[in-house]
Image (cartoon, grey):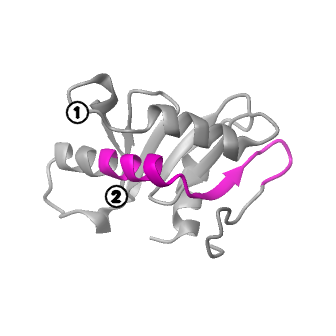
């Protein structure tokens, strides 16, 4: 799974042109209904505050939504604007839904710890694509 695959899937999922979104290294997406002048910083702050997993609390809760065409799953979190993508290649084909959710939750925790932005999308006529934090281009 490369960044472009993740970007393409998020573009197909997030239909509202007013919603900006930020993609992190492990596939976590932070949606921003009213982005500031620096959506990456805003998304990092939100993920830093709401992304860490706290088992036994609402921060450990998730739900799983299968994508059409077997493209993978979206794993939600306790925050409605923080969701994580899990590709079929990342998990056994016969894995139960709870395993998909736990993997997505783990990926979200990694993204919350590292905060490495891979793509920022602001659809009001512009998209800022590419790496930040010194990562290689997608």
Distance from disc 1 to disc 2, alpha carbons, whole Å, reads 29 Å
Residue drawn where x is 62% and y is 76% of the image: 136
Using the image, determine if residue 12 lies above or below residue 37: below
Q: Which residues are magenta?
A: 105-127
Front of the two marks 1 and 2: 1
If the image is split into quadrants, where does the C terminus sit? bottom right
Say if 120 sits above or below 63 in the image. below
Instruction: Rate crowding at label 1 as few (under 14), some (14 to 19) or many (20 or more) other CA atoms within 10 Å.
Output: few
The foreground one among 118 and 96 is 118
Q: Is residue 121 magenta?
A: yes
Task: Indicate which disc, 1 or 2, sits on the residue closer to the N terminus.
Answer: 1
Q: Quadrant of the N terminus?
A: bottom left
Mark sitting on residue 70: 2
Given residues 72 and 61, the one toward you in this image is: 61
Instruction: Inspect this view and state whether residue 67 appears.
Output: no
Residue 65 sits in which quadrant? Answer: top left
Q: Residue at x 56, y 34 (%)?
A: 46
Q: Is residue 98 visible?
A: yes
Q: Nearer the viewer, residue 58 or 2?
A: 58
Q: Is residue 111 magenta?
A: yes
Q: Which mark is residue 55?
A: 1
């Amino acid at each position: 799974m490369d960044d472009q695959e993740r970007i393409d899937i998020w573009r197909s999922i997030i239909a509202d042109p007013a919603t900006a979104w930020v993609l992190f290294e492990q596939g976590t997406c932070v949606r921003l209904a009213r982005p500031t002048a620096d959506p990456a910083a805003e998304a990092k702050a939100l993920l830093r505050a709401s992304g860490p997993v706290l088992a036994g609390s609402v921060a450990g809760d998730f739900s799983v939504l299968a994508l059409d065409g077997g493209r993978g799953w979206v794993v939600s979190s306790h925050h409605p604007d923080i969701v994580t993508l899990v590709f079929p290649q990342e998990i056994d084909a016969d894995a139960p839904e709870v395993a998909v959710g736990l993997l997505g939750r783990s990926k979200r925790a990694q993204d919350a710890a590292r905060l490495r932005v891979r793509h920022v999308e602001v659809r009001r006529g512009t998209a800022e694509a590419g790496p930040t934090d010194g990562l290689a281009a997608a």
